[in-house]
Amino acid sequence: MTTRELQEYWRSEKGHWKPVKLLFEIASARIEQRRVSKFVMYQIVVIQTGSFDSNKAVLERRYSDFEKLQKSLLKSYREEIEDVVFPGKRLTGNFSEEMIGERRLALREYLRLLYAIRAVRRSRELLDFLTRPELREAFGCLRAGQYARALDTLLRVVPLLERLTVHCPAAPVPALCAVFVCYRDLERPAEAFAAGERALRCLQARESHRYYVPLLEAMVRLAYSLGKDFASLQGRLEESQLHRPSHRGFSLKELSVREYLS
């Protein structure tokens, strides 16, 4: 694309972005007793408002996870969140039924207020709080060759990741490519191809993205094996390689297993 075409594309894309409204509920809480620790685990349900949501996200976080989120937000968004009340710890009674019930309501309100602040809603801190533990687990399973387990976790977290990053469409690409790899290595090629198409849509006008060429290479091979028309994919790949000649880099799987190492 020329510079003008790229500018026109982004203006058009920006006009199509629709803010996604999410509702946070703390559906339940349970006390976990470990050998050397005791804590409360809160179940967070994230629902998209305005329509029936068949892909609601369910995740679990400890009170200490909320504390870490608050501390990280204070470093970058102190002024923005100065009116947001974070439910603090008490010296005693933290495991009483009454206290857990009060904290469930307070943490729900805390998330609601954070999400209402545009800068925080788009922040890396909130995104990591809501998705990073699941993504780390999924990519860890992928590295271990546990593709079914990795896929199960990815399919639960990717819809939430996509909703949280509407303003940054390329953000879900590593996770979508991991879905592609899992389906392909589980010998479910049609589903892998569909995941790859979703990832490519996220990469429109982003030919320089590190996943773009490896994804196209994988999609060309898969399209050929499925008997699909791969000419357009091959054309995009050759055009990209013509404009940005370079030595051969990582394959799609090699890129994926390097994600979320820390």
Image (cartoon, rainbow, N blue to C red):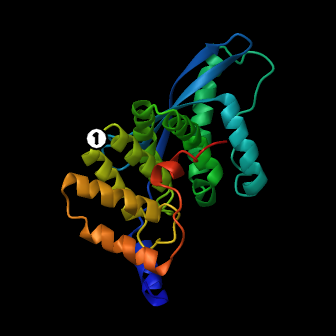
Residue 83 appears at what percent x and percent y? 71, 50
Residue at position x 51%, y 57% in the image:
171
Residue 176 appears at what percent x and percent y? 42, 50
Q: Is residue 78 left or right of residue 225?
A: right
Q: Is residue 197 left or right of residue 143?
A: left
Q: Is residue 225 left or right of residue 36?
A: left
Image vertical order of residue 209 relative to residue 123, above or below: below
Q: Is residue 98 visible?
A: yes
For the residue pair 96 and 120, the one nearer the viewer reads as: 120
Q: Is residue 21 visible?
A: no
Q: Quadrant of residue 40?
A: top right
Per the image, the residue denoted by label 1 is 188
For the residue pair 113 and 141, the one nearer the viewer reads as: 141
Q: Residue furthest right?
A: 91
Mark 1: which amino acid? Arg
Disc 1: CA contacts within 10 A as few (<14), some (14-19) or many (>=20)? few
- How many numbered discs, if any? 1
Quadrant (top left, top right, bottom left, bottom right) of the C terminus:
top right
Residue at position x 57%, y 39% in the image:
136
Residue at position x 58%, y 31% in the image:
105
Image vertical order of residue 211 relative to residue 130, above or below: below
For the residue pair 88 and 193, the one nearer the viewer reads as: 193
Quadrant (top left, top right, bottom left, bottom right) of the N terminus:
bottom left
Q: Quadrant of residue 17?
A: bottom left
Image vertical order of residue 44 relative to residue 256, above or below: above
Q: Is residue 121 left or right of residue 166?
A: right
Mark 1 secondary-structure assignment: loop
